[in-house]
Amino acid sequence: MSDAKASLPAALWQRTLRQIVDRFALREVAGEDGGPYLALHSHAPMYQGRVGQVRLFRGGPLFQVVTSTIVVPPIGLDSHMMFAFTPSDSAVPHFTLDSVQAGDQYAFHLDLIPRLDLGAHLGYMDACFTPLSPAFDKGDTLAGLSKAQLSPRQHAIMSPWMLAKRATAEAFAALDPLVDDYLRHWFALVEGGVDAALLEGVDRAALIDRDRRNKAMIFNRDVDKVWDQITPLVGADAAERQIELLRRTSA
């Protein structure tokens, strides 16, 4: 996971992934050929050959970390996604980062994904999300960032502290401290857990069921049109295998 000669999106992704893997001593799960979990090959006429890979990591207190890289030079696409999933019966949020360049435009998506209804669990919200407010406010007003176009449905299934922004190259290059703020808070939650007193009326079965339902909405072609954009590039089978992997629960 070297940052040498990496693009801005790749470097941010590599740096963040390395911190997670090192922190929790995760191991990478290889594919059938001993390489990445799933190699991605172009199905588009303008470019032939391999365009990326899906990588899978497991271990420590996490359920799994799934990453997806797609790089297609002829169309100027340089995309790097990661979801770090906690166990399905945990109230600790999942962590996600998208790091993208499309042509001369940069974009990123950074969030902790709630495991409970924030509108009904004030203590949980204040423990897991309110501490992100200073970093969110900084990211929401950073020069060179502008609002990404997401639907109300996409906003509803993530957190109000989600940062989904387009960025200039200069602004994107300055994102490391912002991502680190979110990552440090998430590390503390993973390692310290969520106080059981904040989970009133929520049992293990409810956490698992919500995780299943939430993932089915997040990784959904009808909700997130990015899957319709990816499919012509990597083929229907590879796209569906990614969706299936991302939707998995640990119980």
Image (cartoon, rainbow, N blue to C red):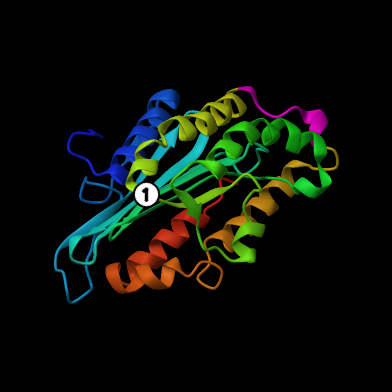
- Residue in the picture at 61% in, 38% down: 137
The N terminus sits in image quarter: top left
Using the rendered image of the protein, determine whether residue 38 is visible from the camera's viewpoint.
no
Q: Position of residue 195 (x, y in %)?
A: 75, 27
Q: Which residue is mark 1?
A: 168
Q: Position of residue 241 (x, y in %)?
A: 39, 62
Q: Is residue 45 above or below residue 27?
A: below
Q: Position of residue 66 (x, y in %)?
A: 41, 47
Circle 1 SS class: loop
- Residue in the picture at 68% in, 38% down: 91
In reply to whether residue 198 is colored magenta, the answer given is yes
Question: Residue 26 is drawn in which quadrant?
Answer: top left
Q: Is residue 224 above or below residue 135?
A: below
In reply to whether residue 224 is colored magenta, the answer given is no
**Image position of 53 (left or right of 137):** left
- Residue in the picture at 29% in, 67% down: 234
Q: Position of residue 95 (x, y in %)?
A: 53, 41
**Image position of 239 (left or right of 87):** left
Q: Amino acid at mark 1?
A: Thr
Q: Which is more toward the observer, 249 or 220?
A: 220
Q: Is residue 27 above or below residue 143?
A: above
Using the rendered image of the protein, determine whether residue 188 is visible from the camera's viewpoint.
yes
- Residue in the picture at 47% in, 41% down: 64
Q: Residue furthest bottom?
A: 45
Crowd tier of the residue under label 1, counting other residues whose Cα lies within 10 Å: few below 14, some 14–19, many 20 or above: some
Question: Residue 25 is drawn in which quadrant?
Answer: top left
The stretch of residues the image draws in magenta is 192-199
Q: Which is more toward the observer, 64 or 95?
A: 95
